[in-house]
Image (cartoon, rainbow, N blue to C red):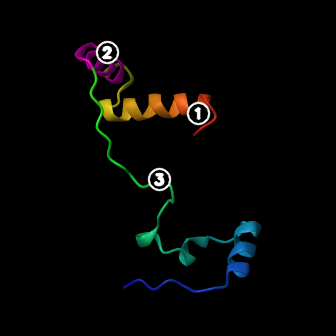
């Protein structure tokens, strides 16, 4: 078992702000979470022509269909100021 060092939040903030010391020794990377980033499954039906067009574009830029859909939706939401 790899036990991490324990310090106060104030000490952690100080070390981080100074930027002279590696803070990863104080982090529990095995249990890290990113709030609001948990995956949530959705099902969407697309017409065949859209799936074909998405696949062509995804292949062109070298990503999967799922990644392509995520990129396009994230870009659109960002443009709307909702990302």
Q: Quadrant of the C terminus?
A: top right
Q: Is mark 3 on a helix, strand or loop?
A: loop
Mark sitting earlier along the chain (1/3) = 3
Q: Which one is in front, 20 or 23? A: 23
- Marks 1 and 3 sit apart, C-alpha to C-alpha, by 15 Å
Q: Residue at x 56, y 77 (%)?
A: 26
- Residue 35 in the image, given as x and y percentages of width and height: 51, 60
The label number, if any, that marks residue 78 in the structure image: 1
Does the segment drawn in magenta span residue 53?
yes
**What residue appears at the point 41 percent right and 83 percent down from the top-left corner?**
2
Q: Position of residue 55 (x, y in %)?
A: 29, 21
Badge number at residue 37: 3
In front here: 40 or 34? 40
Res. 64 visible in picture = no
Q: In this view, does 64 lie to the left or right of 33?
A: left
Query: Does residue 81 appear to the left or right of 4 in the view shown?
Result: right
């Amino acid at each position: 078992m790899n036990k991490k060092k324990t310090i106060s939040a104030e000490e952690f903030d100080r070390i981080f702000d100074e930027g002279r010391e590696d803070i990863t020794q104080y982090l529990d990377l095995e249990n890290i979470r990113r709030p609001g980033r948990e995956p949530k499954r959705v099902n969407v039906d697309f017409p065949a022509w859209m799936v074909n067009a998405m696949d062509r574009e995804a292949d062109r830029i070298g990503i999967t269909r799922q990644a392509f859909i995520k990129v396009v939706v994230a870009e659109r939401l960002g443009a709307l100021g909702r990302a």
